[in-house]
Image (cartoon, rainbow, N blue to C red):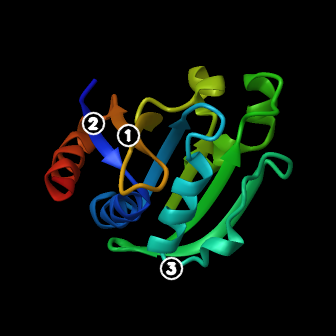
Amino acid sequence: MPSVTLNDIDLARLQSFAVQLTRQMPTELIVGLVGTLGAGKTTFTQALAAAAGVDPEDVTSPTFTLLCSYDANIAAGPIRLHHLDAYRLADEDEFLELGVEELFDSQNTWVLIEWADRVKSVLPPETLWINIDVNDAIVGGETPSRVITLSTDDVGLAKQLVDLAMAMS
């Protein structure tokens, strides 16, 4: 599984990372977001939404609503951005009952799933995994930085991961 690790990600670099994703990735994308409580999954989603032309204040954690959808634009064209949260779901069956398989098959659609590790067995193999870890080091005297690791089993996304790493270095 190809992977890329980005170190010392503060809020400014997180926003830059989100912009690069909107430039590098295709119009169909499934993103599995993994990280502990407070790691920055929703903050990342807000940054990504902003980079795609969505007001980040409209993007909140879908912990209780389970699914929020937005019209967005990336470099490759207009997309529908779906933001899901698997934290409160009992199991993969409950996740599938949300109709996510239809979302996975939709064209011009990005599906971002917080707590995706809880439903990993039912996610497609082409899922882009984004693992967000809190780094104890303080960057710029503000908040702890993050270490972001991207990985995928999709050979087609391997080039985009390399391009993304180059753009972030």
Q: Is residue 108 in sight in this rendering?
A: no
Q: Which quarter shows the N terminus?
A: top left
Q: Secondary structure at mark 3?
A: loop
Residue 54 quadrant: bottom right
| Image location (x, y in percent) of residue 57 | 67, 73
Q: CA–CA distance between discs 3 and 1?
A: 23 Å
Q: Which residue corresponds to mark 1?
A: 148
Image location of residue 117, percent across then percent down: 58, 26
State left or right for residue 13 relative to residue 123. Answer: left
Residue 53: numbered disc: 3
Q: Nearer the viewer, mark 3 or mark 1?
A: 1
Label 2: which residue?
5
Instruction: Report if residue 154 is visible in the image.
Output: yes
Mark 2 vs 1: CB contact within 8 A:
yes
Is the residue marked by circle 1 packed among few (<14), some (14-19), or many (20+) residues within 10 Å?
many
Give the x, y percent position of residue 92: 73, 24
Q: Earlier in the sequence, mark 2 or mark 1?
A: 2
Element type where label 1 sits in the image: strand
